[in-house]
Amino acid sequence: MMIETERLILREYTLDDFDALYEIMSDAETMQHYPAPFDEARTRRWIEWNLDNYAKYGFGLWAVVLKETGEFIGDCGITIQNIDGESLPEIGYHIHKKYWRRGYAKEAAQAVRDWAFENTDYPSLYSYCKYTNEASYKTAEAIGMHFEKEYPDEVNKITHVSVIHRT
């Protein structure tokens, strides 16, 4: 599977992506809205989880690379997540902090949204994050999602949920 946008390529993870992903997921600033940055074992499990998702669902989080250079700058894709007790399709993304505020998360998430509506039967797609992660829910809004709800949970204290419905 591969998705191309104007500036990006989204492709399936390989274990060769470990070092570049670990640089992102182990960074305290990038992971400030998670319970903790990822260690090496958690980063490996993240890649393995996505490889399992590809086999199980035909999708997962995909590696985001710059088309011009081939540099790995993050991930973006669709996963099935427990959102307020329901298993729902969620668009998620992580971009290396040196590439923040350049529109890469929006560009990747738009491509994933379009792919999901073209290749799945899901009537709606969701994005969720800790209520303090304004950058994440602003990215969701930038691809046409709107605020659905907030709910209390053990991990995030309060989780913010955005949604877009198939038109």
Image: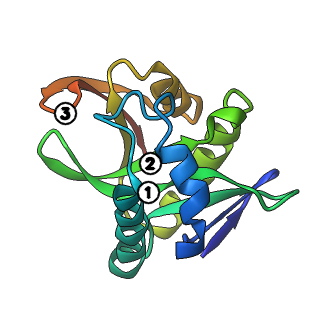
Mark 3 vs mark 2: in front: 3
Q: Is residue 14 above or below residue 165?
A: below
* Residue 110 shows up from this direction: yes
Marks 2,1: beta carbons within 8 A: yes
Distance between mark 2 and mark 1 Cα atoms: 5 Å
Q: Residue at x 45, y 69 (%)?
A: 59
Q: Which residue is mark 3?
A: 155
| Amino acid on which the number 3 mark rests in the picture | Val
Quadrant of the rendered image containing residue 133: top left
Q: Which residue is mark 2?
A: 91
Query: SS class of the residue under badge 2?
Result: strand
10 Å neighbourhood of mark 1: few (<14), some, or many (≥20)?
many
Point out residue 134 in the picture as x, y percentages from the top left corner: 46, 19
Towards the viewer: 4 or 69:
69
Towards the viewer: 140 or 157:
157
Q: Which residue is mark 1?
A: 78
Distance between mark 3 and mark 1 Cα atoms: 20 Å
